[in-house]
Amino acid sequence: MNLPPRVKTQYPRTQDYPEDESIPVPIETVFFLDDGKQDPYQPNRYYFDYPGNWATSNNGENIIGLRSIKLQRSHIKLDFIIKIAKYKEEDYLDNYENSYDYTINKLVQQKNAKYVDLNVVCWIKFDEISYDNLFEMVNDSMINYINKGWADGFVQNYALPNDRDILLDGYYDKNGYHIIIYSERNKTFLDDYDLSFQLYYANDNFKELFNVPKLDGLWKKEIIFDKVWDLKPCNVFSSIAEQSAHHYIGTTDNEYPEIKYFKLNSSDQRFWVEFHSMGRNSSPACFPKSVSFAIEIQFQSFNKRLNGWFTFI
């Protein structure tokens, strides 16, 4: 009996697959800060929706390719006025009434306190990664006021921070980066004088960068601005990196020569991206409205049957 030729079934051939099998095309897209939704309780985290025609497709395993993460910066002009009152501690105690703010106003009005309006104008350039220029500008402006006779009775020693009537500094904690206006005289016993400060005026750039939507107009021994962007590049974490330690995906201002791929196992319809300052890894990065970011991503589906999981002959 004549039998038909045997068909080798151990290794399937390409011609055995249907000719109408479609190959999914990767989706290239870019996400900007404005495209996301900021977490109300964690301001350094943003949520983005996956492309609808990709998230709902049934083309196998979902793969995300990361091309770059870039911060988009511009020059920022800061224009602000700090009122400074310098007075003897005994005068404050003798005239105390109602509250700290009320008493300082009283001392200024009665001319029992030395007083000056310090106007500072400073540019934060797009490539700066610290506030050193701003800190020095405040110091230089105060020295200039004293030299021109606009701040009689005030002292601003260029070489000795402990002998200055006003200083600016920055520090980190678990809640982010902070900038403080203060005087070392309030902490030492170099003389009998204390200093108080009031942020009298600030332009919109200052309010956005220093997170002060409204000036309270109160006298304080120190003014602290909370959740300030520290200008540093960031370490970036995201839910797309499910298998990466701590969900780490990379750093800002870096374009990868080869795409970084991440495999998704979840069926979520959105993903989150989180920014932490490289100045201090645990410190959240809080961007002002004048700063944005761009994340270039490639969305693709991986079909094992179409991507080399079988050996063809």
Image: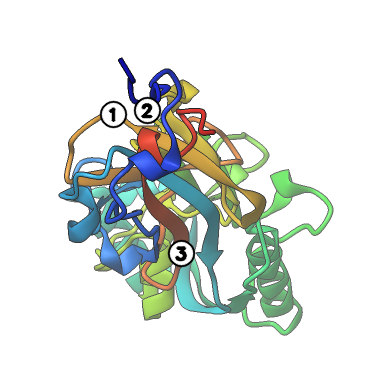
Are dots 3 and 1 in contact, CB under 8 Å?
Answer: no
Circle 1 sits in a helix, a strand or a loop, which is it? Answer: loop
Which mark's residue is nearer the viewer, 2 or 3?
A: 2
Which mark's residue is nearer the viewer, 3 or 1?
A: 1
Residue at the disc numbered 3: 294
Colouring chosen for the image of the structure: rainbow
Q: Does 90 sit above or below residue 132?
A: above
Quarter holding the N terminus?
top left
Q: Residues within 10 Å of mark 2 (few under 14, many from 20)?
A: some
Residue drawn at the location 29% of the way across and 48% of the way down = 43
- Farthest residue, direction right: 159
Residue at the disc numbered 2: 242
Residue drawn at the location 48% of the way across and 30% of the way down = 282
Are dots 2 and 1 in contact, CB under 8 Å?
Answer: yes
Of the pair 292 and 153, the residue shown nearer to us: 292
Q: Does 55 sit above or below residue 303?
A: below
Mark 2 → mark 1, Cα distance in angstroms: 8 Å
**Residue 296 visible here:** yes
* Residue type marked 1: Asn
Quarter holding the C terminus?
top right
Q: Earlier in the sequence, mark 2 or mark 3?
A: 2
Circle 3 sits in a helix, a strand or a loop, which is it? Answer: strand
Residue drawn at the location 55% of the way across and 56% of the way down = 68
Of the pair 177 and 278, the residue shown nearer to us: 278
Q: Earlier in the sequence, mark 3 or mark 1?
A: 1
**Residue 224 visible here:** no
Of the pair 19 and 110, the residue shown nearer to us: 19
Q: Residues within 10 Å of mark 1 (few under 14, many from 20)?
A: few
* Residue type marked 2: Glu
Residue at the disc numbered 1: 265
* Residue type marked 3: Ala
